[in-house]
Image (spheres, rainbow, N blue to C red):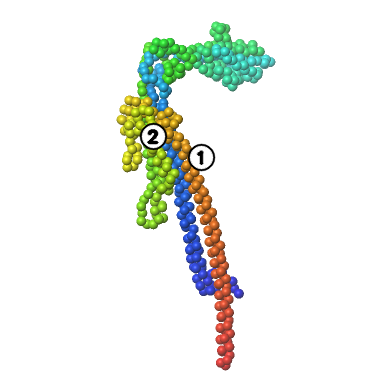
Amino acid sequence: MASISTLGVGSGLDLSTILDNLTTAEKASLKPITTQQSAYTAKLSAYGTLSSALTAFQTANTALNSADLFSATTATSTSSAFSATTSGNTVAGKYSISVTQLAQAQTLTSGIQTSNTTALGSSDASRTLSIKLADGTSKDITLTSDQTSLTGMRDAINGAGAGVSASIIKVADGEYRLSLTASKTGEANAVSSVTVTGDDTLQGIVGFDATKSDADNPLDLSVKAQDAELTVNNVAITSSTNTISDALEGITLNLSDVTSGNQSLTITQDTSKASTAISNFVDAYNNLLDQFNALTKYTAVDTGSDAQDSSNGALLGDSTLRSIQTQIKSLLTNNTSSSAYKTLAQIGVTSDPTTGELTLDADKLKTELTKDPTGIKEMIVGDGKTTGITTKLATNLTSWLSSTGSIQSAKDGVSKTLNTLTEQYNSTNTRINNLIARYKAQFTQLDVTMNSLNSTSDYLTQQFENMTSSSSK
């Protein structure tokens, strides 16, 4: 009996089409599962978008959550010889400053040598090069015979952390000098002595003693160490550096030149830093609100539930997002503030009653910051621990975005549901595939049986025809 390779050939029935229709009907039961998978996958992605939006808002909130913003000052100098920076506790005022001398680092220079690579010390000597600074610190550097060239000593000194930096100056062809410069400016950081023990030859090249005259020292004093000298409101000040942070409270002076007589340094209140931070906060809040609206968008349509789902935000009706949004809105006021300021509207930040977006009146904000920056700080920052708009927001944002926060919990729930749906899909798909396989086997058997019956029928018909033909003769 011939095998049946195509369904329906033996039976004469369109079994292939019937099987396809059965497959399509059974596979339809997978669609609700895939629809749910798509929805939950979109929801998982939406939680990621929510986290990113909250993180961006957190950055702006952190920048505003600084008490120093509301006591910020700016420094203006009448001379390019000095500038100043201020800290959060600087008091506005005016100072008379005269700079008569800048701090500088000491530099020692050796005599001319014909080579920078030729060893200069005694070949059979064991030597130690000792560098001592005016503040009493010292460093001993052991040198091999190969390290007594200018290059060798330079590298050994630079690697020792001796409070000086060494370099080689090429004066002309065949003329080299070793230069030692103190790492820090000021008299206390100058080199007081350079001594080579165990090698008199090298001592005669790089020896130095600050108590001796220039004529008695192999190393020349090229640049003398000196402290900065200045007066502030006619009070004399000396400093080992040109950056002076401890003379005036909250003010760091940066000296770059001497002045011609007294010059003025004026410290004034600076509202621009707080204004910028508040403006950025408003923008960040509005951007966050836009994300909330996009994630919870609702659009009424008449073309069926599928179209309705695809046009809506992935977190429409989501309790996690709704809770966060409600809490943030409630934290934009500080009714417990000890100052006269309780709401952002008092400083020019108002909320649109329809959209909820914040609007900033820059002129009103500047006026209020100029009038009472401390009161505004009390409302916005509070004590920086438990009170204040930005302080409370910071606590909540940290909690929401943490690995154990509400967003992560919601994501974990969605992931668990997706895993369940995947198992359900695989189980249902396996059941359908097994059922279709049984249908196909049954249809194939039907084809074989029908083909066999048809063959028998054809045979019997032929036999009857033959018998009838013989009887008629």
Q: Are marks 1 and 2 in contact (CB under 8 Å)?
A: no
Question: Residue tagged by mark 2?
Answer: 281
Q: Indicate the position of residue 241 as horizontal and vertical percent values.
A: 48, 16
The spot of residue 144 in percent (x, y) is 65, 19
Between 173 and 190, the one nearer to me in the picture:
190
262 relative position to 220: left or right:
left
**Label 1 sits on residue:** 403
Residue 99 drawn at (x, y percent): 41, 13
Mark 1 Cα-neighbour bin, 10 Å: few <14, some 14–19, many ≥20: few
Give me the residue at 53% from left, 72% from top.
9
The disc at residue 349 is none
Q: Using the image as rendered, state which of residue 74 and residue 89 is in the foreground.
A: 89
Q: Which amino acid does the dot numbered 2 rest on?
A: Phe
**Which amino acid type corresponds to the residue marked 1 in the rendered image?**
Ser
Q: Nearer the viewer, residue 109 or 187?
A: 187
- The answer to whether residue 260 of the structure is visible from this angle is no
Determine the image quadrant of residue 433: bottom right
Residue shown at the point (46%, 12%) measured from the top left:
238
Q: How many marks?
A: 2
Q: Residue furthest right?
A: 124
- On the image, the x and y values in percent for residue 459 come to 58, 81
Quadrant of the image occupied by residue 270: top left
When the figure is inspected, residue 79 is found, relative to residue 312, above or below; the finding is: above
> In which quadrant of the rendered image does the C terminus lie?
bottom right
- In this rendering, is residue 327 above or below 227? below
